[in-house]
Image (cartoon, coloured by chain):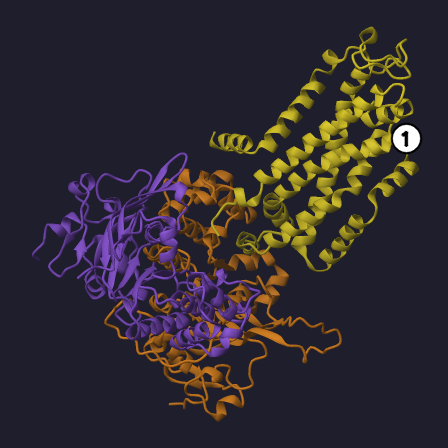
Chain colours: A yellow, B orange, C purple
Amino acid sequence: MTKIQKALRAIVSDKQLLFGLIGIAVLLLIILFQDVLETHDPYDYGPDSLAAPGINGHLLGTNKLGQDVYSMLIAGVSTSLKVALISSLISALIGILLGGAAGFLGGKVDMVLSELINVFMMIPTFFLELMIIAMFGNSITNVMIVIGLTSWASNAKLMRAQALSLRERTFVKSAIVMGETRPQILFNYIIPNGIFPVIANTTMGMSGAILTEASLSFLGLGDVNVISWGQMIYDGKSYITSAWWIATFAGIAIVLTVITFYMLGDGLNHVLNPKHISGGKK
Amino acid sequence: MSDKNTPFLTIDHITKWYPHNDGRIHLFRSREKRSWVKAVDDVSLTMNRGEVLGIIGESGCGKSTLGRILVRLESPTSGDVLLGGRSTAQMLREDRKAFRKRVQIVFQNPFDTFTPRDTIQKILMRPLRNYGIGASDEERLAMCREALEAGGLHPTDEILKRYPHELSGGQLQRISIIRSMFFKPDLIIADEPVSMLDVSVRADIINMLLDLAKKNNTAVIFISHDIALTRYISDHIAVMYLGRVVEYGRTDDVIAGPRHPYTRVLISHCADVDPDQARDSLPITGEPPTPINPGPGCYFAPRCFMACEGCRAAYPGRVELENGHYVCCSCIREE
Amino acid sequence: MEHLLDVRDLSITYLNKSRNVQAVRHASFTIDRGDSLGLVGESGSGKSTLAMGMLRILPENSIEMTGSALFMGKDLISISHEEMNRLRWKEIAVVFQKAMNALSPVHRIGTQIEDIYRVHEPRATKAEIHDRTMELLRMVNMPERVYRLYPHEMSGGMLQRVAIVISLLHSPKLLVFDEATTALDVVTQGQILEEVVAMEKTIEMTRIMITHDMSVVASSCRKVAVMYAGELVEIGMVRDVLKQPLHPYTQGLMSSFPSLKGEKKQLRAIPGFLPDLSDPPAGCAFASRCPHCTQQCLSQKPVLREMPDGRRVACHLVGGQKHE
């Protein structure tokens, strides 16, 4: 009970986190009531091509193929969230494991992993993403995996820094003396105590993932079989003067979602700051 | 365990050197030419089963490093520690878990000894499960309850549910001792176990540690800067200065009749709670330096009020006095 | 004789959203010119809060102070901030436990001392400040070259001495040591205490030592005030109080301290915990841990009463045997 109260107080005290959470809640509600909210089937090529907003019951108009823009926006929410979630999960998982191992084990392991992290931080990720998508095809699954595989380096760097300081803490030393094995210490002590900055960073990274997916789609490397906002902008860019609504509303949707995730991430960063939640006195 | 002539614990010429980072890059310098911080420098000590050995000295004298080497949180640069005549380096290689069970440590900072994310129950159950002590989780939980009760931590159910930051330093330190004693270790290192606690709870923690040690026939190495407290609990005392043991002997011999000039200075500067005990402090100059390439000669010589020419030539050997009391000082003659 | 500092009925409460912690309750004591008082207590006793409250360096919007602290005729609790700023450092100075953290790592000690000196004496010349500092450095057995050193070139003991020197720049009437020697090594602590005591023979200085360590008080103070859970429980001459403590808490505290030379008595701890200071007990604050607790102790709060030897003790049991 007290824990829930504490969490609630933390949420209310941090405006950014509050707005972020409200934004996420709205997005989730849209996904949940997708069928109710959609006025048309977004995949259905209707008879009205390039209809302006308001015409024939198309709230935000239609595109070249007669798809309802409003319904496509609604359908795009789940695509964006899916991309954000899965790619960030991949990125967090790799980052935490590699960063944690590097920082905690030290020595040669650290040397090799640190170099790997540096390489991934330095290479132009977007270029790499383009290459991989070009080579392995542009299904939405590939897009998510590629984004995850190219964005873990900052998570790893954070986790490594955490592990480096945590392994000097008395409770890690005492776990060693209590006979616990290295994997046990990594998973029971290092990761649970050092994960919070990574969570915050990952949440912020979600907005990056959404943007990357949109960029890939915009360049024509997105999954044409799935409705996504980036894809909509890509489709709409040829009509930007004659049918502005196709790209504009998708663009606004991306901006709002990115801001939401950014606020959530930054809010989490404040609230989950080790200074706020640290256990014992120093 | 072994025959009578082998001491239970032998610390055999332990050294721990760290490369000294003086800001310059030494790519091609040989090992000999680089400068070293000699945190522990050629320390040899022995002790018997069930005894309490106090190690005193100022900060930076290497007493904590020595403690960490004994529990193998760090490995020595050279030398070995023999437990019952067997090399601990070898024991660690052969069976790490078995070695950990025999040598335990209580840390100085009880507020940081346990992970802030777990309850006391989880913290106490983990080593029991890990080592298969107790047949079932119910039995282990009962063991935890019993140990907490015996340690004066009640209501036990309440304590088990708490997180470390919800308990006081004294309570945490008791739990730390209880957890170490689950293993009935042969040797326990107590590294300043009460220096961060309030004075009025210190005695209880110390008494608990000593009682449990006596019950399990555990040898205790008590590392402290508090000379008065060490005097109360240890059978023998070793005084360290800049990584070296400068004096060793039975507690009363060392405290009441210190012979090494450093020990004499140290004790003379100790404030007593008795205002009538007029302090007659011996002169000492300077501050304890960092042990970067100390010597040759006695490390204490630059600050020593007794220093003579001979002191600066070579590090003095042991001068044996009565009852195993010895000092490393070239100004003292054997009796 | 007029007291240098006369604290009357001082209470300090930390205001929190959920609970108000009464860290200091109705503390009254006095210090004469040239005297030295050890303020002893464990963590949570309110000893630091008391001193910091008098110096007005607690966050004023989250505390509430009542009572008075007359220092040379001025009430430290009610004077304006400007007036307090004029007094601080010039008339009242503090040395903290980690005073070295207050020094800037990128400036030489001498430069920092000049800056600090000029806060109160803006027109002081370099030579003037230098001479004053040298005089003080000699008193704490430090070489003159310290003036040109950077903080990282000095050990903790030397930096603490520098902090003492800085606090003495303007010869303050009152000097407060807040655990100033706690983090130091045995030898260094002993040296500094000796230097401070010796210094008092040459310059007029009144000193409050806040510490948890009875041995510091034993070797450096004339009077001692023992605090427990925000209340003063025993005040008197060090010799009287430490030799024959009357309050059960002081007795308990004294028997928890190991002696360096005396016989090895069994060390005893005081069982139990501090009371919750957001809801202090109606009776004696120590009652729950006291071996001699009576019904009266639980219901009625004992006040400080004067004993024949001049010390004051807040305990019903001691008060009843006034002419022992």
Name the residue: 45% across, 86% down. Answer: B329
Up-down relation of residue C47 to residue B117 (above or below) = below
- Which chain is indicated by disc 1? A
Q: In the rendered image, which residue does mark 1 sit on?
A: A220
Mark 1: amino acid: Gly
Extreme residue in the left direction = C323
Residue A135 percent across, percent down from the top left: 92, 38
Residue C115 percent across, percent down from the top left: 49, 64
Number of callouts in the render?
A: 1
Extreme residue in the top direction = A56
Is A216 left or right of A152, judged from the image as shown?
Answer: right
Could you say whether the residue bearing mark 1 is in a helix, strand or loop? loop
Q: Could one spot residue A39 in this view of the protein?
A: yes
Residue C323 percent across, percent down from the top left: 7, 56
Up-down relation of residue C34 to residue C289 (above or below) = below
The residue lying toward the viewer, choosing from B233 and A20, is A20
Is A26 left or right of B97, judged from the image as shown?
Answer: right
The residue lying toward the viewer, choosing from A67 and B145, is A67
Residue B67 percent across, percent down from the top left: 51, 65
The residue lying toward the viewer, choosing from A22 and C78, is C78
Extreme residue in the bottom direction = B309
Q: Residues within 10 Å of mark 1 (few under 14, many from 20)?
A: some
Up-down relation of residue A71 to residue C54 (above or below) = above
Q: Quadrant of the C terminus of chain B?
A: bottom left
The residue lying toward the viewer, choosing from A99 and B323, is A99
Is A189 left or right of B177, judged from the image as shown?
Answer: right
